[in-house]
Structure formats: structure tokens, C-alpha cells
Image: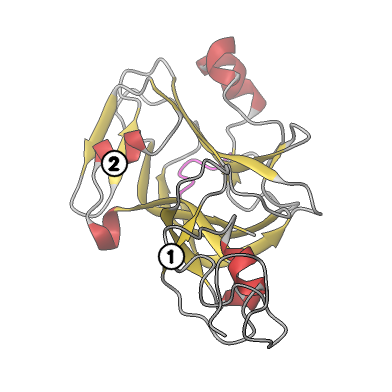
Amino acid sequence: ADELCNNIDEDCDGDVDEGVLGFEETCPAASCDEIVTTNSGSLSDTTYYLDPTDSGSGELFECDMNTDGGGWTKVVGWNREDDDDTLIDFENLWDSYTNNMTSTIEEADYIEWADSDGTGDDLEASATIDVANGGEVLFTVDYFGDSMEGSGIWFYVTTDDGTSTFTDENLLCASPTSSVLSSDYSASERSVIPGYTCADTTSSDSDLTYVEDKTSFSLSGDEITAFGISSLHSDSSGGDASQLYKVDLWVR
């Protein structure tokens, strides 16, 4: 018999709700990974209906069903480079957003934030992740940090035990020296730094380029509950700047 949305194997093939769960608004899955576990065949990278908070109403989420075994749910997505997402789209992406930079502009394929009065400024953005996951991350970013010797950038996730981290190597992380932090930034501004350390950037002209295309990490089974970006800039001429082209975060 045809499959129905009832957790019963009507067509007697060993799977339940395949081709139904996540394919219909009235039969949403909890995550893209749940759709993979109920389907033995191949699935397309497209949108599926999910209800991660069990609200009773399904919404379309983008799923990656093929990278590294599939089952990835996109929980954060912003792309100025390819999709013409705007600065307003970026600001609306976050549940919590604070931007004290003296300059924030929108260019053709990126947005840029910077300090231009030499006092030291901070930006902090955080999005809650409601999709159940096992602590696995699939991450895409295109970021350029211009002359970061007095500035810092942190891309990070927060796990259910309250730890802020990304990888053991802190791949997407740069911090000014402790002396610059103490002299250029207030205690409030320093508080936006997540709870891990990374290498100091001490050269006279330390540029940073991060281009990662769907790089996967595992956080040892700790459920990921939030994703954030923190940034510090201090430069009287605005020469220290962050340029963000795109950022996507998927969980599984």
C-alpha cells in the first residue's frame, strides 16, 4: 500500500513514512537527518518540510542530502556574493545583534564593518539553533579581514553545556595581542570574545582570508544550540576591516 504519515510501513519495504515524511507540509520531519533515516534511496539536495520545535506546523528548510552521508539541515544562511543578500538580511538573520562599529557598509558582493575613530568597537551576532543535532557541523564561509593586527574575529558555535568553540584548531579565529586588547578595548567590548583562545595576530599588516566550502567538524556529540560571530576593530582610519561575502551553517 502507499505510505502514509503514521510511522507504519504500509509498503512493506522495511522503512516507514519514506517519500512522505518531510515531503508534505502536513508531515514535517524534525530534521533533515530524520528524513535520511526513513529513506533507503537517494535524496536530492533541496528544501523539505521540518518542524524542529514540534509546533505542529511544517516549514521549508534547505537540506544537504549528499555531503558526507547527507542529512544536514541549514540553520544559518546568508550570501551576498551569489544571492545578493543585503545588509538588512544579515541584521535580520540573528536573534541577538549588536553593532557598535563606526562604519558598516554594503558593497557589490560583501558587507564591511570597521572602526574609524580609533576608540575600538565591537560587533556581536548570535542565532539560536532549534534543530536537534548530534554536534556535527557543516560550514561555509567567505571572509576577508583587512590589516587585523589590532583587531579580532571569531566564528563560533555554542553547545548545550554552555561551551563556545568551533574546532580544536580554532580555524576561524584571530585575536589582537593581550596588550592591544587591554589598551584599545573596554571590558564590555572584550566581553564579546567567546570562551576560547586563538593565536595572536601580531604582524604589521596581518590580512586574513577564510574560504571554506562545506567543511565538516564534529564536536564530540555535544548538541549545538547557537551560532555566533564576534568581531573587534580598532583603527583611526578604518583600515582594519571585516569583509563578509557569505556564511552558511548546517548541523546534523
The residue to which callout 1 is attached is 24
Q: Earlier in the sequence, mark 1 or mark 2?
A: 1
Prevailing SS of the magenta stretch? loop
In the image, which disc is placed on residue 89?
A: 2
Circle 2 Cα neighbour tier, 10 Å, few/some/many (<14 / 14–19 / ≥20)? some
Q: Is residue 241 above or below residue 75?
A: above
Q: Nearer the viewer, residue 250 or 202?
A: 250
Residue 6 placement, left or right of 151 = right
Q: Tell me the kind of residue under disc 2.
A: Asp
**Identity of the amino acid at label 1?**
Glu
Magenta region: 202-207
In the current view of this chain or complex, which residue is farthest to the front?
1
In this rendering, the label closer to the viewer, 1 or 2:
1
Marks 1 and 2, Cα distance to the nearest angstrom? 28 Å
Which residue: 59% across, 22% down?
A: 181
* Quadrant in the picture for residue 97: top left
Q: Which quadrant does the N terminus fall into?
A: bottom right
Quarter holding the C terminus is bottom right
Q: How is the image coloured?
A: secondary structure
Taking the view exactly as shown, the residue that stands out farthest to the right is 220
